Image (cartoon, rainbow, N blue to C red):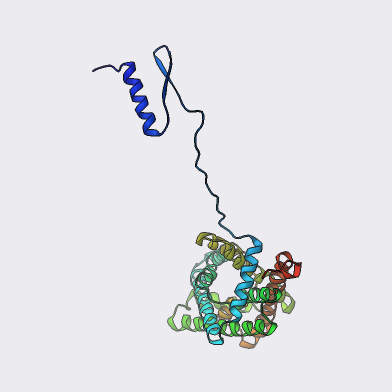
Amino acid sequence: MATSTPKTVLSSLALFGVASGLMVTPAPRLGNVVRATFPRTATIKSVTASSMVETPADTYHMIANKGEALSKMSVAKTLHSSIMGGLQVGLGGLLCLTVCGNMGGVAMSNPGLVKFTFAALFPVCLVLVVGSGTQLYTGNTASMMSAYWEKKVKLPDVLKSWVISFIGNFIGCAGLAFVGAYTGILSGGAATFAAALGPAKCGGGFGRQLVKGILCNYLVCMAIFLATQARDMMGKYIGIAVPISTFVATGYEHSVANLFLLPAAILAGSSLTVGEAIVKNLIPVTIGNAIAGALLIGASFSYSYGALGGTPRD
């Protein structure tokens, strides 16, 4: 086998330097070792950083603009969008009842695990809603009032949106409860779980239900805020999952979710009556949800970034 000569080594290093874009020059020998020197300066390509989220201020004004756009929708389109939103919440609710209601003895030995599972599954509702652009009464409390605080809509526009979206959500949610019962999905363990859940949601008195409604919709509207703030699908999913799982696991009350869960409980054979569901849950929870969206989200962010704080935008 032939041995390499110094010239051969230098030639190879030179070719390597050309191929790699670096200049290789021979240097004084150190014994039998050839030292290569590299240029002192190198060009580094600049990289432009791009944020994957909107700023809080921009996000708030995006939500206010959304409220303005919602106010311009026809009654028929608002109703349709809200029915579809209720349908999507019902799908997520039926998923939770089916899985958690069939966890067997786990519910007796480890009720916390059942609650954790319910909380982990329920965000699918808002992922569907946000991803498809449908409407929920709870989200509209924030978007419409944000638009109101920024003087983009009038109070009658806000009330119209709330009423129509609530009616549409009820149609979609209650419809899914009937579908679950009709198809047999809401049966067995799922029916037992739903029937027990109904009366549990109607205890504690008006004041407690009101506060649970406020805390719940603060988290729900923050989920929508974070999903709006994120520019990619994974960011939107994380922004939704964390607040929604928190409200479910903690036991707060969401009026639209209850428009599915309470009819499902009644259809599953619960002792709960329609009157009790309305008076002991839906009325205080719906009011609490509105307070959270209008004040804790809409007015609060408007004070920080909008008209109530003296920094309106066109």
89 or 160: which is nearer to us?
Answer: 160
Position of the N terminus by quadrant? top left
Q: Residue furthest left?
A: 1
Apparent side of residue 118 relative to residue 27 in the rendered image (left or right)? right
Apparent side of residue 306 relative to residue 269 in the rendered image (left or right)? right
Q: Residue furthest top?
A: 31
Residue at the spot 34% in from the left edge and 16% down from the top edge: 6
State how many labels appear.
0
Q: Tell me where residue 122 appears, x and y as whole percent.
A: 54, 69
Would you place residue 251 above or below residue 35 in this image? below
171 or 202: which is nearer to us?
Answer: 171
Q: Tell me where residue 76 appears, x and y as whole percent.
A: 53, 87
Is there any visible trace of residue 225 in the rendered image? yes
Apparent side of residue 126 relative to residue 35 in the rendered image (left or right)? right
Q: Tell me where residue 245 appears, x and y as whole percent.
A: 59, 64
Would you place residue 312 above or below residue 86 in this image? above
Q: Tell me where residue 279 appears, x and y as whole percent.
A: 68, 85
Position of the C terminus by quadrant? bottom right
| Res. 285 image quadrant | bottom right
218 or 109: which is nearer to us?
Answer: 218
Is there any visible trace of residue 250 in the rendered image? no
Would you place residue 243 above or below residue 294 in this image? above
